[in-house]
């Protein structure tokens, strides 16, 4: 009774350990590897139960029923083990295709149906008889003509699983290697003894004992690697859950742009077909260029959706990346917010333009009143008139600059370059200031080395540059004094010099003004008597023309501004 008791204890141990494995892993059934592990465990459970039934059944008919149950239960062991190993070590993604899965399981299904049909069962097994091996009573049989084909098919599938394991063993280190070995040793021992027994024609009792031990060793190896050493950690399940629940479409492609996986959002938004795995992403998304940046995609709702496309290489320490994560970040809400912000800024710019336009009229009226009062009052009030006129000029210039800013701001001061004649532009600017010059009793002396200068640039910007510099010079120039304006050609550049006979600027104050005007902002808008926004506009417009700006001043000697523009 020694061998029988030993085999019964092995079968009971296999049943217990298999039940523990199923109970411990069933909570993670959403993980693909766990689902295959549960199938393998159930097959082992059926195999152990049938072996136990063969050993303890009293009649031959009962033993034959359990023996056939063992055959039927273990038919699917080889393909399920292959897919378990494949899902654990993530090799050969072509195995995931539905056609491949059908080909792998089709012989097992045919074998299963043939076993149920008495007319075809003899093609696999026949001549079942009682068989005694030592003190155990089991069942012997003869092999049918088709058994060899199914046997080779099962061995081929197991061979593929061991190739995957071998590759994983070679690329693993440390504890992971021991896990790979332990996971395969149990079933490997059973397969080896089965092959040797068939080749050497050992008694069928040897195969029976070997199969019993291989099931026990296999479930022990699974418990050792999966439960004790966490080969199938909960982390992949958590990552898979997060991946599928992300609100933005995500694709995972290999180095040949074949789709290896997508999340639920990508399936729904792009309305992907069922057999999308293995197809190129260009085929699935023909209208979406795989270039990082903003893309517009027409969804199945026939509406345009805005995404920011990001491509992240998957790094595994190799010289070349094995794949890429294609991430579509939805920026639709951002686009709506940007549009509302743009509309708000455009409204405020229009409002500011209207206010500046109305204020400009009021300032002009103020200047006319000042000019009229100046004629009717004596010289004792001249200082007050000068102050009022200076303030009026500063306000007028400020308003012009604000209007210039409003006009250019939506286009972010884009340079609209076209040919224009500089001398005519200067004369038009001086003409627009004529009433101011007369009122202030200041003369502009204009000299030019050429009668005409044709240059490429933005005439509106250049007019703003001239107007701001001349207004600053006019405010600083006392009555009965002059402003000197000269235009010359110097080393492929147009050089414009504007010099006044004003009071000049202290060195420290000049440095502060120049430093404050380097970056364009509105910090100086409130400084009606200073350079403020005007000088900022001047320097910015000149930089857009790739020109140069210089400002030289000494107290009591006036100020000179030099503008150089490339021809």
Image (cartoon, rainbow, N blue to C red):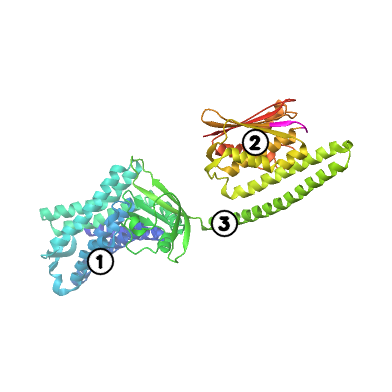
Q: Which residue is mark 2?
A: 517
Q: Is residue 509 above or below residue 36?
A: above
| Image point (77%, 32%), residue name | 480
Label 2 vs label 1, nearer the camera: 2
Quadrant position of the N terminus in the picture:
bottom left
Residue drawn at x 60%, y 44% as measured from the top left = 460
Distance from Cα at disc 2 to Cα at disc 1:
96 Å
Q: Is residue 442 left or right of residue 376?
A: left
* Residue bounds of the magenta highlight: 478-483
- Please give the residue where the numbered disc 1 appears in the rendered image: 53
Q: Position of residue 412 (x, y in %)?
A: 57, 46
Crowd class of label 1 (few under 14; some 14 to 19; many from 20; radius 10 Å): many
Side of 60 relative to 315 (left or right): left
Residue 81 placement, left or right of 199: right
Q: Position of residue 22 (x, y in %)?
A: 36, 60
Asked if 340 appears above or below 318 in the picture, the reply is below
Q: Is residue 446 visible?
A: yes
Report helix, strand or loop for mark 2: loop
Residue 483 occupies quadrant: top right
Q: Is residue 336 above or below residue 255?
A: below
Q: Please check the rendered image and state whether residue 439 is part of the magenta-colored stretch, yes or no.
A: no
**Closer to us: 521 or 143:** 521
Provide residue 536's location: percent of width, then percent of height.
Answer: 64, 38
Q: Secondary structure at mark 1?
A: helix
The residue identified by callout 3 is 339
Of residues 253 and 455, which is closer to you in this image?
455
Residue 537 visible in the picture: no
- Give the CA separation, mark 3 to mark 1: 75 Å
Label 2 packing within 10 angstroms: few (<14), some (14-19), many (20+):
many
Residue 81, labelled with which disc? none
């Amino acid at each position: 009774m020694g061998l029988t008791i030993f085999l019964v204890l092995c079968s009971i141990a296999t049943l217990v350990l298999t039940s523990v494995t199923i109970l411990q892993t069933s909570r993670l059934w959403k993980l693909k590897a766990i689902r295959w592990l549960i199938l393998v465990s159930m097959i082992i459970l059926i195999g152990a139960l049938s072996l136990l039934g063969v050993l303890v059944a009293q009649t031959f008919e009962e033993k034959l029923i359990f023996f056939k149950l063992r055959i039927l239960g273990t038919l699917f062991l080889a393909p399920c083990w292959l897919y378990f190993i494949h899902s654990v070590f993530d090799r050969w993604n072509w195995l995931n295709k539905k056609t491949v899965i059908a080909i792998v399981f089709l012989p097992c299904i045919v074998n299963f149906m043939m076993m149920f049909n008495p007319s075809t069962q003899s093609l696999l097994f026949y001549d079942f008889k009682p068989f005694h091996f030592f003190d155990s009573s089991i069942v012997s049989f003869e092999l049918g003509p088709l058994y060899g084909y199914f046997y080779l098919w099962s061995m081929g599938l197991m061979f593929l699983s061991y190739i995957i394991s071998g590759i994983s063993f070679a690329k693993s280190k440390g504890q992971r290697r021991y896990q790979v070995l332990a996971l395969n040793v149990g079933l490997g021992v059973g397969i080896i003894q089965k092959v040797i027994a068939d080749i050497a024609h050992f008694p069928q009792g040897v195969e029976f004992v070997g199969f019993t031990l291989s099931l026990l060793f296999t479930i022990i190896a699974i418990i050792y690697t999966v439960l004790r050493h966490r080969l199938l950690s909960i982390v992949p399940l958590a990552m898979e859950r997060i991946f599928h629940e992300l609100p933005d479409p995500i694709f995972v492609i290999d180095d040949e742009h074949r789709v290896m996986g997508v999340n639920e959002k990508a399936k729904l938004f792009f309305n992907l077909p069922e057999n999308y795995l293995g197809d190129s992403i260009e085929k699935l998304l023909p209208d979406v260029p795989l270039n990082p940046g903003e893309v517009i995609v027409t969804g199945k709702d026939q509406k345009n959706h805005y995404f920011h496309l990001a491509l992240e290489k998957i790094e595994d320490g190799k010289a070349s990346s094995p794949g890429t994560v294609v991430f579509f970040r939805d920026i639709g809400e951002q686009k709506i917010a940007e549009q509302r912000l743009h509309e708000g800024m455009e409204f405020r710019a229009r409002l500011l333009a209207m206010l500046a336009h109305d204020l400009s009229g009021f300032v002009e009226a103020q200047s006319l009143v000042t000019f009229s009062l100046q004629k009717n009052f004596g010289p004792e009030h001249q200082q007050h008139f000068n102050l009022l006129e200076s303030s009026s000029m500063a306000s007028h210039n400020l308003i012009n600059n604000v209007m210039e800013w409003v006009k250019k701001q939506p286009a972010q001061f884009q340079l609209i370059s076209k040919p224009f004649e500089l001398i005519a532009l200067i004369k038009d600017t001086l003409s627009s200031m004529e009433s101011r010059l007369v009122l202030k009793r200041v003369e502009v002396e204009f000299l030019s080395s050429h009668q005409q200068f044709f240059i490429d640039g933005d005439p509106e910007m250049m007019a703003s540059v001239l107007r701001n510099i001349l207004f600053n010079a006019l405010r600083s120039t006392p009555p009965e004094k002059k402003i000197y304006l000269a235009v010359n050609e110097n080393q492929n550049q147009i050089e414009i010099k504007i010099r006044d006979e004003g009071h000049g600027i202290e060195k420290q104050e000049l440095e502060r003004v120049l430093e404050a005007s380097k970056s364009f902002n509105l910090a100086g808008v409130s400084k009606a008597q200073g350079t403020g926004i005007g000088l900022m506009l001047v320097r910015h417009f000149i930089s857009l023309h790739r020109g140069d700006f210089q400002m030289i001043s000494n107290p009591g000697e006036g100020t000179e501004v030099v503008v150089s523009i490339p021809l």
